[in-house]
Amino acid sequence: MSSLIQAVDSLARLFAGIRGSMGSIVVSRVERSLDEYVEATGVSRALESPGIVGLWEGGRGFDGVVGYVDSSSRSIGFNQSRFTITGLAVSVNGLIEFSPNVSGVLATRFLGVKSVRPVLERVESSGLGFTVVKSVVGEYYDVDYKDDNIGDELRIELENRALEKLGGMGSVDVVVVDGPVYHAQQILFHDNWRENKYARAFYELLKDRVKVLANSSKPVVGFVKRVEYSRKLAKCDEVVEIIEKAMGRRPSPETTDPLIVEYLAETYVKPRLMQLVVIGPLLLEYKRKPRGLEELLVEKVYWYIARKTPRGYQIARIEVLRKHWDRWKNTILEALDLLLSSLSLRGVPVGLEIVDRASRRLTALLYMLLYQRLAGIISLAYDEYGKVNEVYRELVE
């Protein structure tokens, strides 16, 4: 941690030098609407039929090496500035590496700074290479910039670099990333998306991600834990026909995927406790592609998995690029068997659980480090004290 301590100490010295010129400013958190982020566009169809709903049987086995990737972000608010902390963990053969690098490389862009323009310009001119005061399209993280977007932008950037590295490693056979293989935020599907600073930033990050995936020498699998707002299955003709035949009516296009998954599982499979239901493979296509995104919104192959527990169903989505499926189908199916046979009690592959906890612990450590170094220099936001206690408890558990 010595290099990270040095980095935060250099940031503290900078703010100690400029606090007298800040005045009595208050930088508040700005929320993002859900509709801006959730992907609700695209249509699906069965890739292989019949039998898109059934129990997972397993049995293929996988002898290859899997590289797991997960990132984390959290923010800490001071009256004069807010800081978004990002971190990433990679696991290969049980060995975990972190970004930002803890071996002394401070140029990893992991700390977003949000404040008034004069403060941002001072941070920018300071030469602290680990700080980020602008989006990838040059928009300053000023007081009206949405905090969630800062975290997403920095995390996707970290993930892209990790996927690029793993995609070229000869010792890795499959890469598994927490979340979609690429993000297609709903804000990108507006006709005037180029006029929106957040959409332009996500476009650049999407372009980078698709390029990384296209150049990968092995398949990349996305495991999506948070699917409560996803609406893909209600736009799949085969799924709609199954439901219409059973219920006598078609589901609304706005029906969320977890509702459909649970209905299909309970109606057609009726699994016992802890049995795993698989729906798919399905193909996701974007029929309507905004100008400029024609080459980026590439087809995905995906599955839904559902495991019945005493507390209800655990539901997740697994996805790969169609191009990766066509090239590495058998490897992907074998890797899916490995992932599904290693689900934790939370319904997440153990390999992803490891990097998830590691990345969250890293950002928690950085959070406490920022708190300790900066709280005596600039005023902590009034609503941050409870959060400090929560993060501390998270670290000592």
Image: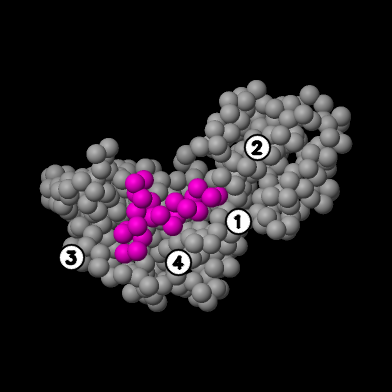
Q: Which residue is mark 1?
A: 98
Q: Is residue 24 above or below residue 125?
A: above
Residues marked 1 and 3 touching at CB (< 8 Å): no
Q: CA distance from mark 2 to mark 3?
A: 53 Å
Of the residues under marks 2 and 3, which one precedes in the sequence? 3
In-image side of 324 versus 58 (left or right) = right
Q: Amino acid at mark 1?
A: Phe
Find numbered disc 1 in the image and state the secondary structure of the residue it sits on: strand
Q: Which residue is mark 2?
A: 368
In-image side of 396 versus 382 (left or right) = left
Residue 207 placement: quadrant: bottom right
Disc 2: CA contacts within 10 A as few (<14), some (14-19) or many (>=20): some
Which numbered tag is attached to residue 50?
A: 3
Q: CA distance from mark 3 to mark 4?
A: 30 Å
Find numbered disc 4 in the image and state the secondary structure of the residue it sits on: strand
Q: Amino acid at mark 3?
A: Pro
Q: Amino acid at mark 2?
A: Met
Residue drawn where x is 23% and y is 54% of the image:
277
Which numbered tag is attached to residue 60?
A: none
Q: Position of residue 265 (x, y in %)?
A: 20, 49
- Colour scheme used in the picture? one colour
Q: Which residue is mark 4?
A: 66
**Bounds of the magenta segment:** 337-359
Q: Amino acid at mark 4?
A: Val
Q: Number of callouts in the render?
A: 4
Q: Is residue 71 above or below residue 14?
A: below
Of the residues under marks 1 and 4, which one precedes in the sequence? 4
Of the residues under marks 1 and 2, which one precedes in the sequence? 1
Q: CA distance from mark 2 to mark 4?
A: 32 Å
Q: Main secondary structure of the magenta part?
A: helix
- Assess whether residue 12 is covered by the magenta stretch: no
